[in-house]
Image (spheres, rainbow, N blue to C red):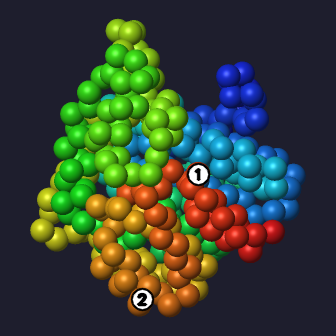
């Protein structure tokens, strides 16, 4: 089931909002940009593990002039309700939610842009629903992640620190992950505004359920992964794919990128300088690569 409601005035009303019911009754929040009347290939934007649809607002607004763009908050993130038991944060549930979203939003075929974990979900479509995946943009995502980098993320995801104001939130993000990045204070402020919300205690809190750290921590420390992500990646053999790689990434290492290029020689690859995990997608290199890739899907 899908319900539609007007967008918030604060965002200039350039998107519609949906609440999509999953099989267990959980509601997933989705922003929709553009028109369903356009014949252009739709774009589905899947955020990183702790992030939400707001990360894609500028990109979706730009491409929404030409195509339908859908940006969901995955379960327990943004405006999507937290799972009551945290069992819903397992990767299998996320994949099931994604398939339900495709059906409810009538995305029979689309290009997927996935940041980090969103990229993993995008790759999974090549196995779970290959006819739906017209093309894939991986934002610092692949079939192999550095376990140390994942553990670092899991540790801070599970112990969020409320912030007193937006300047403090921006500084915290920069100090936590952005040392050496070519980003200014305004960039970090924008990322903070997209990832925090003010609660009743007057403080700014991260816009995700901290319980999402549990499956991520288990995945990062597992000696053997339950899913062969290289087999999933190889299922992209006939799917046009673009990889954006943060040059300073501590999660997607250059060795993994080299193996991806060897396994898929037609993989379009852009290294984004001055950023790590993951590019904000506003970089010149990211914008040009995404725009050029999407031009292949009129």
Asked whether the viewer can see residue 98, the reply is no
> x and y percent of residue 291 in the render?
70, 64
Quarter assignment of residue 209 = top left
> x and y percent of residue 148 in the render?
18, 60
State the SS at label 2.
Answer: helix
Q: Residue visible at 82% across and 55% down?
A: 66
Quarter assignment of residue 287 = bottom right
> Which tag is nearer the camera, tag 2 or tag 1?
1
Q: Say whether residue 199 is left or right of residue 238.
A: left
Name the quarter where the C terminus is drawn: bottom right
The disc at residue 115 is none
Counting other residues with Cα less than 10 Å from the Cα at mark 2, is it few (<14), some (14-19), or many (20 or more)?
Answer: some
Q: Residue visible at 56% across and 38% down?
A: 54
In this view, 7 is above or below 191? above
In this view, 165 is above or below 159? above
Q: How many marks?
A: 2
Q: Which residue is mark 2?
A: 263
Q: Nearer the viewer, residue 107 or 65?
A: 65
Q: What is the spatial separation of the Cα atoms under label 2 and label 1, in whole angstroms?
A: 28 Å
> x and y percent of residue 134 in the render?
65, 72
Q: Which residue is mark 1?
A: 282
Q: Nearer the viewer, residue 165 or 235?
A: 165
State the SS at label 1.
Answer: loop
Q: Nearer the viewer, residue 67 or 126?
A: 67
Asked whether the viewer can see residue 241, the reply is yes
Q: Say whether residue 261 is left or right of residue 226.
A: right
Q: Residue visible at 41% across and 24% down?
A: 167
Mark 2 vs 1, N-terminal side: 2
Q: Residue visible at 48% across and 74% down?
A: 127
């Amino acid at each position: 089931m899908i319900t539609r409601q007007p967008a918030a005035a604060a965002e200039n009303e350039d998107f519609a909002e949906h609440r999509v019911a999953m099989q267990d009754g959980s509601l997933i929040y989705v922003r929709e940009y553009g028109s369903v009347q356009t014949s252009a290939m739709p774009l589905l934007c899947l955020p990183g593990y702790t992030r939400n649809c707001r990360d894609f607002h500028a990109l979706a607004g730009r491409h929404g002039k030409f195509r339908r763009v859908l940006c969901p908050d995955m379960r327990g993130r943004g405006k999507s309700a937290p799972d009551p038991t945290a069992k819903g944060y397992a990767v299998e549930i996320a994949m099931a939610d994604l398939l339900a979203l495709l059906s409810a939003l009538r995305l029979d075929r689309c290009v997927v842009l996935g940041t980090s974990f969103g990229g993993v979900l995008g790759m999974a479509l090549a196995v779970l629903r290959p006819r739906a995946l017209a093309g894939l943009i991986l934002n610092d995502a692949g079939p192999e992640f550095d376990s140390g980098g994942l553990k670092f993320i899991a540790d801070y995801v599970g112990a969020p620190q409320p912030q007193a104001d937006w300047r403090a939130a921006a500084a915290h993000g920069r100090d936590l992950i952005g040392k050496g990045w070519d980003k200014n204070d305004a960039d970090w402020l924008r990322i903070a505004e997209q990832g925090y919300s003010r609660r009743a205690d007057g403080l700014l809190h991260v816009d995700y359920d901290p319980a999402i750290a549990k499956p991520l921590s288990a995945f990062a420390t597992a000696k053997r992964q339950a899913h062969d992500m290289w087999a999933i990646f190889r299922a992209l053999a006939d799917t046009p794919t673009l990889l954006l790689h943060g040059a300073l990434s501590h999660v997607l290492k250059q060795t993994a990128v080299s193996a991806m290029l060897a396994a898929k020689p037609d993989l379009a690859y852009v290294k984004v300088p001055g950023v790590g995990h993951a590019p904000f997608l506003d970089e010149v290199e990211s914008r040009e690569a995404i725009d050029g890739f999407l031009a292949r899907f009129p």
